[in-house]
Amino acid sequence: MAVPQRAPNQPPRSRQASRGRQHADALTALSGLQAVGVPVTVEWGRTDLTLAEALNLGPNALLRTSSTIDEPVEVRVNGQLFGRGKLVLVGGNYAVQLTEVIPG
């Protein structure tokens, strides 16, 4: 009787099954944390100011960036890069349509 061959660079089934169980256990452990709030930041552009310029900012001040409206924005979750997207209008409010989610 022939022994089934596994693909090259693929761990034996017992190790794969163990990893699958570990992943399932990790998801179960995290299920209680899914309602925890995390800060989400959308970064569209940056600029540099002198301290004097920053101190002179007030209501209605305009901060110019080098970014254009068509450039992708970065979406950060808890300070870590999560993905990129584009700015869109939804019912008069700005929103971000994700175009890329960063693995990891």
Image (spheres, rainbow, N blue to C red):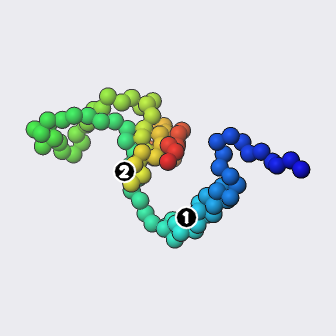
Identify which residue, 66 or 5, lies in the foreground.
5
Percent of width and height locating residue 57: 17, 42
**Residue 73 visible to the viewer:** yes
Amino acid type indicated by mark 2? Gly
Count of marks overlaid on the render: 2
**Residue 96 visible to the viewer:** no
Q: Identify the secondary structure beneath mark 1.
A: helix
The disc label shown at residue 26, or none: 1
Q: Which residue is mark 2?
A: 79
Identify which residue, 41 or 11, lies in the foreground.
11
Farthest bottom residue in view: 32
Percent of width and height locating residue 102: 50, 43
Q: Picture quarter containing residue 26?
A: bottom right
Counting other residues with Cα less than 10 Å from the Cα at mark 2, is it few (<14), some (14-19), or many (20 or more)? few
Percent of width and height locating residue 80: 39, 48
Amino acid type indicated by mark 1? Ala
Residue at the spot 50% in from the left edge and 48% down from the top edge: 104
Query: Vertical placement of 12 versus 71: above or below?
Result: below
Q: Is residue 6 left or right of residue 34?
A: right
Indicate which disc, 2 or 1, sits on the residue closer to the N terminus. 1
Percent of width and height locating residue 70: 45, 30
Identify which residue, 18 or 87, lies in the foreground.
18
Farthest front residue in view: 1
Determine the CA span between mark 2 and mark 1: 22 Å
Q: Is residue 18 left or right of residue 31?
A: right
Residue at the spot 58% in from the left edge and 66% down from the top edge: 25
Residue at the spot 66% in from the left edge and 55% down from the top edge: 16
Query: Vertical placement of 98 versus 15: above or below?
Result: above
